Amino acid sequence: MNNIYAEILKRVENNEALTLKTEFTGSEGIMAESLKKTLAPYEPHTDMRGRCFADVTFEESDDGHSVAGEPFSPPERLIVLGAGHIALPVCEFAAKSGFEVYVCDDRPSFANEGRFPDAAQVLCDSFENCIRQLKITSYDYIVIITRGHTHDADCLREIFKGTQPAYLGLIGSRRRVKGLLEMLLAEGCPKEYMDRICTPIGLDIGAVTPGEIAISILAELVAYKRLPEHSKDGVRCCNDSDVELSVIKYLAENRDPKAIVTVIETKGSTPREAGAKMAVSPRGEVTGSIGGGCSEGAVIRNAVDIIGTGRYMVVDIDLTGEVAESDGMVCGGTMKVLVEDGAEN
């Protein structure tokens, strides 16, 4: 049987956005008879404020037929141009927040894997060559934190030649950055590209130390990722799913018996949002999470029981009142979770 998650991973790594449609009947059943998965086009929508979102959808009809739609978009690469002291915490924090981090510098003593263990790749070459090798896409985030504006200018000239990233941030004082951009404008660089640069970089939290500056930068990156109104051009579409690409990679590559657990709908305050996914082994070991606590523990037991049965079930988790109190969580919402035998995917 084809692994649908392997196909999803292949397509998003080729910079394609798509939607996984899961159709099923009733709250439980045999997957081969009552559950079907298909890949469909990406389906963003626009809210009343004109913001573009692609989020998990769930529709349930009166006859018990349900359809869940999970959006998947290409990995969010964070390209860090400059491997100095600020780059260290930027790489660490960004990797822990779900970005695939690529660090670039022309100094071997700075650009090496020993300094950046959390990076997906460390490139040691001229900044222009690094940018060419990485082949920037519209899903990428770029942070320019080189050791001087000569290198900043080299980076911007090369970036302006190709596809523009989702985010482009530049560190430096207002005065020095103003002079740099005026120079590039005089050279003929497109003004509309320069208008999209976030500078001073990061949210204004009064950051001083490298760690604090990294936090301010990452906060701005997350705002661009999750809040379309932070986009300089105002038209970028945000994927609002709570899915972690690391879980999709695990499902694509791991052939061992497992159950797949997916949050398909949430209401109110919940520890994870729709799209959160985890894999559960026969021993109850998990990859990913749907929020932790006793509620996740109960779902894990259901997942272990379903492995090898070829079945699926829908579990409703109530985090209001006494349930939330017993978990020590201040939530107050509900979650609808689909549990499937992973052998059927």
Image (cartoon, rainbow, N blue to C red):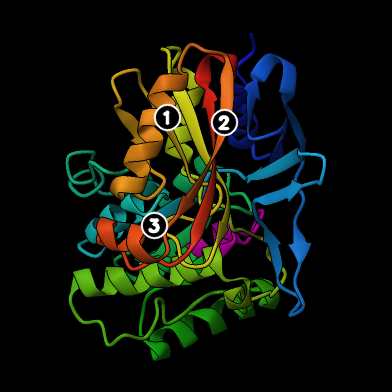
Q: Position of residue 230 (x, y in %)?
A: 57, 76
Q: Position of residue 323 (x, y in %)?
A: 35, 57
The magenta span reads: 155-167
The C terminus sits in image quarter: top right
Residue extending farthest to the front is 322
Closer to the eye: label 3 or 1: 1
Locate residue 305: give its quadrant. Answer: top left
Q: Amino acid at mark 2?
A: Met
Q: Are marks 2 and 3 in contact (CB under 8 Å)?
A: no
Characterize the local packing of mark 3: few (<14), some (14-19) or many (20 or more) Cα atoms within 10 angstroms: many
CA distance for labels 3 and 1: 46 Å
Closer to the eye: label 2 or 3: 2
Task: Say whether disc 2 or disc 1 marks the residue closer to the N-terminus.
Answer: 1
What residue is at 38 percent from the left and 66 percent from the top?
321
Q: Are marks 2 and 1 in contact (CB under 8 Å)?
A: yes
What residue is at 53 percent from the left and 63 percent from the top?
225
**Dot 1 corresponds to which residue?**
302
Task: Say whether disc 2 or disc 3 marks the residue closer to the N-terminus.
Answer: 3
Question: Which secondary structure lies at badge 1?
Answer: helix
The N terminus sits in image quarter: top right
Viewer-nearest residue: 272 or 316: 316
**Dot 3 corresponds to which residue?**
81
**Dot 2 corresponds to which residue?**
313
Q: Is residue 53 magenta?
A: no
Q: Is residue 156 magenta?
A: yes
Question: Which secondary structure lies at badge 3?
Answer: strand
What residue is at 54 percent from the left and 26 percent from the top?
340
